[in-house]
Amino acid sequence: MDKWNLIVDVAKCTNCNLCTLANQDEHVDNEFEGYAAPMPRHDHRWIEIRGRERGDGPLMDVTYLPVMCQHCDDAPCIAAAENDAITKRPDGIVVIDPVKAKGQKAIADACPYGAVIWNEKLDIPQHWFFDAHLLDSGWTEPRCTQVCATGALTAVKVSDQEMSAIKTREGLEELQPESATKPRVHYKNLSLFTHDFIGGTVIKTTEGVTDCVAGATLRLERAGSVVGDGVSDAYGEFKFDGLEPNSGIYRLSIEVDGVEVKRLDVNLTASTNIGRIELAA
Amino acid sequence: MMVFWSSNPESNSGAYGALEGTIRRQWLKEAGIKLVHIDPYHNDSIQLLGGKWIAPRPTSSPALAIAIAYVWITEGLYDKEYVATHTTGFDTWADYVLGKSDGTPKSPEWQETETGVPASDVRALAREWGTKKTYLGAGAWGNGHGGACRNATGIQWARTMVCLIAMQGLGKPGVNMGNMQWGTPHDFQFYFPGYADGGMSGDIHHTGMGVQLYQRMPQLLSINTNTQVIPRMQLPEAIIDGKAEGYLWNGVSIESQFTKITYPKPGFSPVHMLYKYGGSLVGTMPSANRYIEMFRSPNLEFVVNQNIWMEGDTKFADIILPACTNFERHDISEWAGLGGYAHHGEMQLNHRVITFQHKCIEPLGESKSDVEIFRLLCERLDLGAYFCEGVGELGWVKRQFDGSDLPKHISWKDFIRRGYFVVPQEKEELRAPVSFRWFAENRKKDVPEPMPLPSDYSGKYKEGLQTQSGKIEFDCESLKRFDPDSEERPSIAKYKRPEESPNAVGFEDFPLQLISPHPRFSFHTQGDGKDSFLNDIADHRVRVDGYYYLVARMNPLDAEERGIKDNDLVRLHNERGAVICAAKLTHRILRGVVHAYGSSAVYDPIGEPGRSADRGGCVNVLSSPKSQIKKAHSMSASCCQINVDRWIEGEMALPEQQERVA
């Protein structure tokens, strides 16, 4: 049967917060019997947006990562729950019963994603439950995807087989593969958040006038093997992305018109903007 | 290629346009069109769309623009034929750019000391721009609200933007101005009044009612007949000092701006009472402590504040009249329909949508709708019937409906039942033509705009622009006539460093530039404070010790020098006042610059109002009250000089009292 999945495209999230605001609009002060108790007015973001800044001016980027209940097929919260407090529905959605889960803080503690939030006042664990109450009343998608204007969040209801094909085709990844929970939330372009880059600007001074060097050929190597090749743009800028964090020494060589003109080493601890690289005149 | 210059449509697109234009800008990215963003802040549009980020210091953008023109002139990278046939005065401006008239060539190296942008970047940009069809998104409706157009060099910047696009052939295919926000192909023949069209009770002065609505919906002229006006930026001076002068803003013609206004107007009464209606002045107006002083001045005998919210300056009123919310009254409106001075604002959306707003509940407590409050006041003056013309709120909604083109498509009852109407899209063959294409191709003006009015053409109706020559004037004829020797606004666009700038005399103690653009998550004071969900957005406000402080973004190097860490409470201050914010350290802001959103809805002085630090986040307490130039109506508030230090409650609970600095 068809089951729900959420696809998060990290490259398209711009931190507008509409998903979170729509979720608050839906759930603050509103109770949906059998699904969820009201969420508190403040501090409880069932859809949290984490931010990461890489590099520095002018060669930098900022990436946002929406994190919510991953609706795992192998959910640690279900294992931690007593009294059948959590249901894995046939459509893949995980729902925590607000009555049966009362007092079970272990449910919140069990989530490796930090996506089950403990409501101190009501003494219950709460989470983004895919707006199952709306889907059950005929909605074709949850509110967070309905308001997303950039296409960063998409809800799809397909068979597991079909989803598997989509994952391969779109290069979707799990947020934390090491958690091994079989999540139903899948991430695209996740490396923008998890990986690092080395970038810089190639310039050259001729007769006292400094210009950007466009079309310089760059090669990045690590431990003797080629990591990637690139070409500087009109502003002399280049960027090698998707590098493993803290992956040590990289060797950057720069060629202009087929002749190597510069070679330098970079120790990658965090995304690095080398800055302006002056070629000899 | 597309250049976004002080333009951040992903933050405040088109004002009122939400994220409707986002998909069109994503198409740019998908189509592989090169993008350049010029902004001291790595703004939300750069974050989403990517591209080359060029970060000039605030107020220096005109220097960058003039240096681009320098490269184009010296390397022959501009449309010489277009400049010869569609513009005047280019040689005079070129002499300035090349330094022939003042001895200073405005080269990329020259601009580097002003902007901090490497000369090599400027040459690379100028060469790309000069060899590719380039679309320019320059502030304005893009929207860089509160950006380069609203600081001390805003007029210079706006003029240089026109100079640049004129040099590349404005109106030719691919060469135009816009932000991929306005310009969707709607049915512009379908009429529905916008918010600046007046709309009821003969509100015909200073609105766009005369364009169409008055003919469609005749009304009694119950307007105030008093012609005395006060320059808006000088309301506090008018009250406290009893006098003010400025220049009129009037969209009817270009030269209307040359009209000087003085207060008090001879023969008229000074102001005794202020009837305040709408968003808070404190928080949204420059040098906001002046307004506090005004409210507390004995010259202002009586203040009424009619408001939904207890926010900002509401508490400074003698009488507060609680207005109900829009959920408690009927209304009718077109989304983003501005009317008046911003014709066809709805074209920033993907569809024209007109909504009937149902009253959900009766007004709570003692609150009443705005119209009902005005009607009850008028009744006491025996003017109730004259004001309301015999109808209530729903009656006015019906009259707007009848005055629009809605009845041609939907009945009143169906409209109420459905709650909205989407105007059918224009047939492709009837779509409005591209802006300025007529001008580039030497045809009569063919775009659906009411301005310029027939008398404003120097030549024949619809032929040429509303300038004296009918062409784009690098050397402006109207300015030569109005104020030929002006150094502030010379007849050609020049760059002049503002008096309030880093290292300038008198600002030695305030080395940082504070930029305060329109907020991303709230709108004016709407949505901010008031225990709203926005308090939970860490990029808007941050809770420290149980209080939600506005975020002030600082470069990590500036913060380190001052011993400031992430989420530390900091005091932003200058001689105009002090504001306590929560620091956010980020490389997104250029070194030497602090970024905090304007328009806080919370005014919360920790001591004497107007003379102590505000912890509500009204950064406009710090901004300059000055007009960009003396002989025009303008504001320069989007950038001011400040310093920042750590603020520790208790140790500095009552900072030194601030004297008002005019």
Image: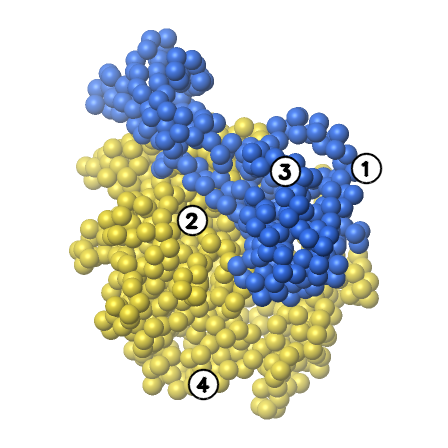
Chain colours: A blue, B yellow
Where is residue A197 shown, x and y percent of the image?
A: 42, 29
The chain that hosts pointer 3 is: A
Kind of residue at badge 4: Asp
Residue at the disc numbered 3: A181
Calculate the distance from the C-alpha at mark 2 to the C-alpha at mark 4: 50 Å
Q: Nearer the viewer, mark 2 or mark 4?
A: 4
First along the sequence among labels 2 and 4? 4
- Mark 1: secondary structure: loop
Tell me the residue that label 4 is attached to.
B318
Q: Are marks 2 and 3 on the same chain?
A: no
Q: Residue at x 57, y 50 (%)?
A: A109
Q: Nearer the viewer, mark 4 or mark 1?
A: 1
State the SS at label 2. loop
Amino acid type, label 1: Met
> Residue A244's image quarter?
top left
State which mark lies toward you, 1 or 3: 3
Q: Secondary structure at mark 3?
A: loop
Query: x and y percent of residue B545 in the render?
Result: 40, 64
Tag 1–tag 3 contact (CB < 8 Å): no
**Percent of width and height locating residue B623:** 33, 61
Q: Is residue B258 above or below residue A274?
A: below
Mark 1 and mark 3: Cα distance apart in space: 20 Å
| Residue B621 found in image quarter | bottom left
Q: CA distance from mark 4 to mark 1?
A: 66 Å
Identity of the residue drawn at 25% across and 21% down: A205
Q: CA distance from mark 3 to mark 4?
A: 62 Å
